[in-house]
Amino acid sequence: MGESWGAFFGGVEPRWVEVGEHPGWDAALALVNRDVGVTLPEEEPLRLVALPGYEEGAPESVYVALANGEWHGNALEPGAEEEPRSALAAVAEAAQDTVTERLWRAWPVCDEHRLGTHVREEDGRVVWWCAGERRAGPGHVVAGVGELTGVGGAGGRRARRKRRKR
């Protein structure tokens, strides 16, 4: 998994979570990875990594990581994977934390306002929400998680300049 993480976790190395170990997280991550593929085509799909529980008998901690094994943020809440909307919201938030902090970029980005979006539940769906411009009115749904179709989040200033030059 790239560099040794053992020094950070008392000698314990994180491990890749195999598909099928956490079906709820797997399903949610598959949707989030659709958005990664559309908006960050240069990145490989995100993965789940796990560390043993901090106390004996505690469940292991599962994180959303980049393909190289790096992650940022809190572990996914044990048990939240049982309810699909909760699992999707948790995985989307964890993915956003990892992408934002490890790649140093807002993700995903609203193409209209050029602002980073946030995970939110709207009308019974988990969505990427843009706060919009304060003077221009209320925020709006950019897309459901797993349903992004544009290039939002695909590159910050440099990509915007490229698009403007076309």
Image (spheres, helix red, strand yellow):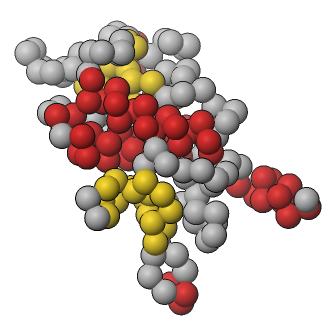
Question: Which residue corresponds to the image point at 43% horizontal and 49% vertical from the top-left?
Answer: 145
Above or below, comparing residue 135 to residue 2 in the picture: below
Above or below, comparing residue 26 to residue 85 in the picture: above
Question: Which residue corresponds to the image point at 9% horizontal and 14% vertical from the top-left?
Answer: 56
Q: Nearer the viewer, residue 129 or 6?
A: 129
Quarter of the rendering containing residue 133: bottom right
Question: Which residue corresponds to the image point at 64% horizontal and 53% vertical from the top-left?
Answer: 150
Q: Is residue 70 visible?
A: no
| Coordinates of residue 89 in the picture (x, y in percent) | 31, 47
Q: Nearer the viewer, residue 3 or 103?
A: 103
| Direction from residue 110 to residue 25 in the image, left or right | left
Quarter of the rendering containing residue 59: top left
Q: Nearer the viewer, residue 81 or 70?
A: 81
Of all residues shown, which one is farthest toward the bottom?
Answer: 135
Of all residues shown, which one is farthest toward the right?
Answer: 165
Of all residues shown, which one is farthest toward the left?
Answer: 57
Quarter of the rendering containing residue 91: top left
Question: Which residue corresponds to the image point at 54% horizontal and 27% vertical from the top-left?
Answer: 45
User: On the rendered image, what quadrant is the C terminus found in?
Assistant: bottom right
| Coordinates of residue 85 in the picture (x, y in percent) | 25, 46
| Coordinates of residue 55 in the picture (x, y in percent) | 12, 20
Above or below, comparing residue 148 to residue 62 in the picture: below
Q: Is residue 116 visible?
A: yes
| Coordinates of residue 137 in the picture (x, y in percent) | 49, 86
